[in-house]
Amino acid sequence: MQEVSKECPNLALNASEISVDGLPIAAGRTPRAAFYQMDAKQLPFQGEFDVIGAFDVLEHIDDDCLVLRQIHGALRNGGGMILTVPQHAFLWTRRDEAAGHFRRYGRTELVTKVREAGFEVVAVTSFVALLLPLLIASRLLGKSGADEVREFKIGRSANALLGVIMWIERLMIRAGLSFPAGGSLLLAARKG
């Protein structure tokens, strides 16, 4: 939400968090957004929003298809949805379990579920594609029982280098390149 707020300062922003304890933390990061405590499986809105983003949300919910239908109902006709989810079941490790994930998605699986919920898929691409070899290596090393959060403990220089690589990847996606594989999937869809 912080980045959306910075990039689109004139948007009316609404956000949700299932955890009551998480609301003040989220609100502190994006003070101009209205925050709601709610469950994505029971959205209390019908035809209310122009765009709904679910960024690394679906993998945490057992009934992801129900959530997609709830999002569909909460959108105005012609409204849009933007999703990000972790990709590739072969990358599953204890890190996913520790994060509370139910699944990692394949592209076909995600597109099928989104279409079955009543959406028209506008675009889909993998991202964290340029870093996929590092992610695979990290996952293989992690399967030996290493600390689940070790990959997040990196130095400032390494973090800056990874940030530059992700910036280059974003430029490539904005230029129209669609990656076939990556650590995550990005999908944009429209309510028909």
Image (spheres, rainbow, N blue to C red):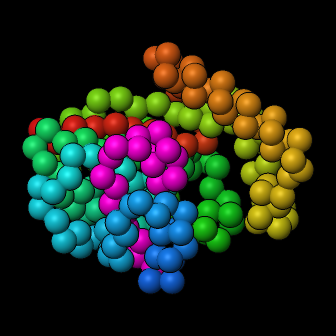
Classify 103 as above or below 35: above
The total of numbered circles placed on residues is: 0
Q: Would you say residue 109 is visible in this rendering?
A: no
User: Where, by quadrant of the figure, is residue 150 drawn?
Assistant: bottom right
Classify 91 as above or below 192: below
Measuring from the top left, give residue 95's x and y in whole percent. Answer: 68, 63
Measuring from the top left, give residue 58's x and y in whole percent. Answer: 41, 59
Q: Nearer the viewer, residue 140 or 121?
A: 121
Residue bounds of the magenta highlight: 1-19
> Residue placed at 34% from the left, 73% from the top?
36
> Residue placed at 50% from the left, 44% from the top?
6
> Residue placed at 39% from the left, 54% from the top?
54
**Left-right relation of 152 to 155:** left
In magenta stretch: residue 150: no
Classify 66 as above or below 135: below
Q: Would you say residue 126 is visible in this rendering?
A: yes
Q: Nearer the viewer, residue 2 or 69?
A: 2
Instruction: Point out the residue furthest to the bottom here.
Output: 21
